[in-house]
Amino acid sequence: MDDPLKWLEVAKSNLKRGEDNSYLDLTDIRLEELCFDLQQCAEKSLKAILIKNKIQFPKTHNIVELLVLIKKKLKITIPDDIKEAAILTDYAVTTRYPCDYNPVSEKEYEEAVKIARRVYMWAKMLVE
């Protein structure tokens, strides 16, 4: 998939699902699952930037690795509030399997929502 707008479309879907805290009324939905979607939003948003600029990237869920690649190849300064997305990386893998993580708190979830929104909007600005 080499259309950056398609990547942003999927990232937006992940964001919408991740920020929809109406799921919290359902006792079987875990914050970790919502945070996984928020990580996916950030990851796909950053990959959209790379695709837009025809930069190849490794198969990775590591947000820092993607940010370093964007900075290096595009020669741009990554805003500090975007660098905060590094904390989302753990939600890509560790929260997918039971017993491999500490439960996500409400505060951590709310912060993840804010960060994913910022990354998505930043990527959208750079891609469109």
Image: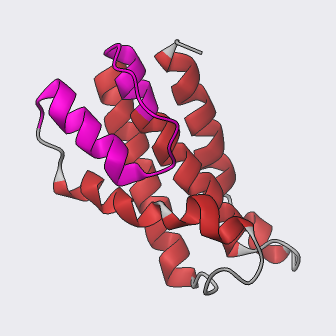
User: Is residue 54 one of those drawn in magenta?
Assistant: yes
Q: Residue at x 40, y 67 (%)?
A: 87
Give the left or right position of residue 1, taking residue 44 as reference: right
Q: Position of residue 19 (x, y in %)?
A: 61, 58
Looking at the picture, does residue 30 appear above or below residue 121? Answer: below
Q: Main secondary structure of the magenta part?
A: helix
Q: Quadrant of the N terminus?
A: top right
> Which is nearer the eye, 14 or 86?
86
User: Hey, which quadrant is residue 76 in on the image?
Assistant: top left
Image quarter where the C terminus lies is: top left
Q: Which residues are magenta?
A: 47-76
**What residue occupies the far front of the structure in this picture?**
58
- Percent across and percent down for residue 89 are 47, 60
Q: Position of residue 2 (x, y in %)?
A: 52, 12
Quarter of the image for residue 34 reads bottom right
The location of residue 107, given as percent across then percent down, is 49, 82
Compared to 36, does 125 lie above or below? above
> Which residue occupies 37% across, 16% down?
52
Q: Residue at x 40, y 51 (%)?
A: 63
